[in-house]
Image (tube, grey):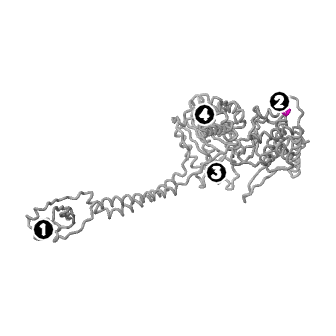
Amino acid sequence: MKKPLFGDGKKKEKKEDPEDKSGQGLASNAASIIFIFFFLAVAYMLFSGGQEKTEEMALSELAEKIKSGQVEKISVEGDDLIITLEGEEKRKSKKEVETALSETLANYGVDPEELAAVETEIKNPTSVSYWLLNILPFLLPIVFIVLFFWLISRQVKGAGMQAFTFGQSKARFIDPKDKNQRVTFKDVAGVKEAKEELTEIVEFLKNPKKFHDIGARIPKGVILMGAPGTGKTLVARAVAGEAGVPFFHLSGSEFVEMFVGVGASRVRDLFKLAKKTSPAIIFVDEIDAVGRVRGTGIGGGNDEREQTLNQILVEMDGFEPNEKIIVMAATNRPDVLDPALMRPGRFDRRIILELPDIADREAILKIHARKKPLAENVNLKVVAQRTPGFSGADLYSLMNEGAILAARNDRKQILQDDLLRSIEKVLLGPERKSKLLSLDEKKITAYHEAGHAVVSSALPYADPVHKISIVSRGHAAGYTLKLPDEEKRFQSKREFLDNIASMLGGYAAERMIFDDLTTGPSNDIQVASALARDMVTKYGMSDTIGPVAFERMAGRSPMGATFEEFDYSEDVAALIDREVSAVMKTQMKRAEEVLLEHKSALHAVATKLREVETIEREEYEKILEAEGIKINKNKDAEKTPPEDNK
């Protein structure tokens, strides 16, 4: 059963895979050939089938019919004769080549007077029909073969041209005149310090002479560092939008290909394009994909990624003082970047984008709510208070989920309840209404979540409870939403210990009420154990070990198996394990003592959960007050410090 912790909201990033369109092009060409062949065949059938099939008649028989007066009309079309007999019956015949019809019939004994009694019409065939009817049967196969080879050669030519352009840059270009894609600082909330730093870049791009006259050189490279979703790409676009300069955007992974030299070629082509359109901004997203520390790859100095990085370093070093090109990059892993990238003259302007505080979150929510109809009861400040640790991308997802929820319920406006429900959806996932718990599972889940809530409310340094629910969300059968009332940049040892005890409250409640355990607390134990180990190995919060940091380095063997390396001895590792175990056992004992002392409150909260499934903060605090529990989270008040692992 997962419990949302402070600052563990994460955004999953999706990456697009390039589509292979070679098979589609071949299939499209084959379909085109078949269609054209079918069209020509139908056209020929229409032209050739325009004449009715008539019975042939010999000239001698025609002469007899004329003598007996049975012929009404004769149409002459070249050497062909179309004969109309009495009763509109038509026959077909042929006259002698290069001989007049009258002369031909006279040879068969037809008198001129008898021929004059028959209507005679001479038709000259049109050039189009003549050529189509006579040449198309021979021309059609030739046209088909020529067309087939032309399409095949075109396909081969396209592949050859693609090979020649393989080393060209794949950067996306954003024109500063394109208002639909233009982003300015007004579209970016929060990150005040970052925007102040970047204002200098904007002024340099607008008026470089101001800096050159005084002998100042603006940084060539600006690297944006921050957690995923903090708006690094958005800020880079805003700089280009404010300055009104072209913006070249691509990912670091787009430089690297399986062919040696392609990445370096693309780097050269990218900087060549940027110089032609200067002043301009080049933005490389996820630069850690190509800018990792060199010398660790299997290929050594000939590794394609390292060659690409070398070319980037050379291009940035080759700028002249009057070059008006700014290279910006973004990463959430600055610790793995090569030192040569970070030295002065390259990415020497480092800007950190942190997760937004409550005021910034409210401003971000207002930006994302511009085109969304909000109801009068919507209070974005309350939403901002409930979303500590959310990034800008998380807040965008929250507002979008709220709009989707309102549209799903056929409402024209977004309600406050839609946004509050969206917080839980972003944190934990959607409700699993089809996942119905049995009566026994529902009872166990209710006591489990009530145990978390009661322990958290009774301990002075644990985060306050905002909501309890036994409705399944994501992988959790239930959840207790605990959030701090104020922004915190540091956490004390007392807060860590109280939160660990709160995480073990569900485990203690199950064991105390049912005298048994389920798999439900597994995630609680994992998170609490990891936090206890960090206290001992990272934060120096163990009185026995003291202020010493112990690092673990994970790696991958050549056979693919993962392994961990430790920079301390086995004796120290055993001591760390004992300290972590002592922290867990001590806080487990505290959780059991709290639940024994407030057992009536545990029963009351669990019973209410089984009835309504979800309890909000106000209703929950009323239940505690009725059971005699006074919630006091004033950290300045004198309190007995919790027992540690001494």
Q: Residues within 10 Å of mark 4 (few under 14, many from 20)?
A: some
Judge by depth and name the residue closer to the eye, 458 or 198. Answer: 458
Determine which of the numbered discs, if any, sits on residue 305 in the image. Answer: 3
Vertical placement of residue 429 versus 39, above or below? above
Numbered disc in front, either 3 or 4? 4
User: Number of callouts in the render?
Assistant: 4
Please tell me which residue lies in front, 564 or 600: 600
Instruction: Please identify the dominant SS of the magenta region.
Output: loop
Under mark 2, the amino acid is Asn
Determine crowd level at label 2: few under 14, some 14-19, many 20+ residues with C-alpha closer than 10 A.
few
Q: Position of residue 144 (x, y in %)?
A: 38, 61
**In terms of secondary structure, where does tag 2 sit?**
loop
| Residue range (magenta) | 625-635
Query: Quadrant location of the C terminus?
Result: top right
* Relative depth, front residue between 457 and 605: 605
Query: Which label sits in the foreground, 1 or 4?
Result: 1
For marks 1 and 4, the one nearer the N-term is 1
Numbered disc in front, either 3 or 1: 1
